[in-house]
Structures are given as structure tokens and as C-alpha cells.
Amino acid sequence: MKTIASRDTRPAILTDETLISLVLSGQESACTILVKRYERLLHSVLQSYLPDYESRQEVIQDTFLRAFRALPGFRGESKFSTWLCKIARSQAISRLRMKRYAAWSSIEGTLSDWEADLHSNEVLLEKQESSQLLRLAVQQLQPNDAKALELFYFYEQSFEEIGALTGWTVSNIKSRLFRARQRLHASLLKEGLQAEYFA
């Protein structure tokens, strides 16, 4: 890009229109003059939108970049400063919307994660509690009845397989299972657990 070389075109007396023409003709120093001229104004305009300096500075840089890219389409229907302020406000509002959306998404995601974790923990605790109560209920049965119940329900052994392991007859196994189921069912109902599986 070219730079402003003429001694007659001092920054203080150059109009916005002149500087815009120089920018459009490729003179980089004209961009610098416009930035210096309006940077403070934009900070002032953006202060009500963005309290922190760094956010304002980022929006201002973005504003000038957008303005210089769109400069060929600037018709001068409003003052250059008004046009710049409009771009800056638009950028600030977009930034705030994005922050709010990101914050809300983050909150929603966190709540969703918490709910999922809480549900998982509740289910796990329920399972652990149920399992513990079931073990306690089984321990209260007669040892052979408990063994018959465990082999049949937990290890899914057939009557014949249980008979081969224990030496009990099929009728003896059925009798033990019936007795174990009745006692276990009553015990689990007393603890408020579902006992249909063993009914």
C-alpha cells in the first residue's frame, strides 16, 4: 500500500472524505489517521454495551476492519463517524448475544449433565441398596434354601444341574425353592422392594 507523501495533506486538516478517497486509492497511512481520529469516540459509544476495555478494543478493531472492507460501498449519505458508530453498535450487540447464548448453553449443558449424573447416581444407589437388601434377605433364609435360590435364579441352573451339584432330588429342589421364594417375597415386600421376580 502507498503512504501519504504530500506535505500539504496534514492529518489535522484532512477531511473524512479526503481520507476515504486516499484509503480507496491504497494509501495505508490514511487508515491509521481514521483509526486514531475515531478510536476514542467508539470507546465512548461502546462503553454502555461493553464495560471492559479489552472487549471494546476487540470490537473497535473488528469495526474498522469491516468498515475498510465495506468502504467502496460507502455512499456518504451519513457522516463517516455515524456509519462507524452504527457498525460498532451492531458488532457489540452481536457479541453480547453470542455471550448470552454461550452462557445459556453452558448453563443448560451443565444442568443437563448434573441431572444425568444425579439420575445415574440415584439409579446406582437404588441398585446398590436393593442389592444389599436382597443379600440380607437371602442370608436370613435357611442355608440350603438360599443355595437353591441362588443356583436357580442368579446362576440360572436347571433342576437337573442343581441336583448334580447338590445331590438333591428334583422334588426336594422344588420344595426348597418354593419355601425360599415365599420367605424372600415377604421379606422384600416388608422392605418396600418389588418382589415379583421371586413370586
Image (cartoon, grey):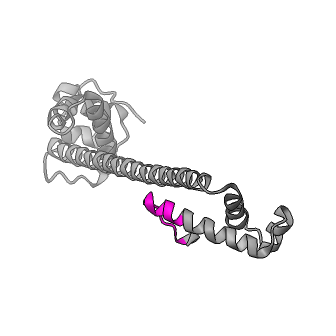
Q: Is residue 30 above or below residue 131?
A: above
Region of the chain picked out in magenta, as a range: 185-196
* In-front residue for pair 196/147: 147
In this orientation, does residue 30 appear?
A: no
Task: Classify the position of the C terminus by image quarter.
Answer: bottom right
The percent coordinates of residue 36 (x first, y second) are 25, 28
Examine the rendered structure and indicate whether residue 164 appears above or below residue 94. below
Instruction: Name the residue at 17% across, 51% down.
Output: 76
The residue closer to the viewer here, 126 or 58, is 126
- Which corner quadrant of the image does residue 12 belong to? top left
| In this view, 25 is above or below 75 | above
The residue lying furthest to the bottom in this view is 171
Residue 15 coordinates in the image, percent (x, y): 17, 36
What count of labels does the image hold?
0
Estimate the x, y position of residue 51 in percent, counting from the top left.
20, 32
Residue 19 is left or right of residue 164, and the answer is left
Q: Quadrant of residue 41?
A: top left
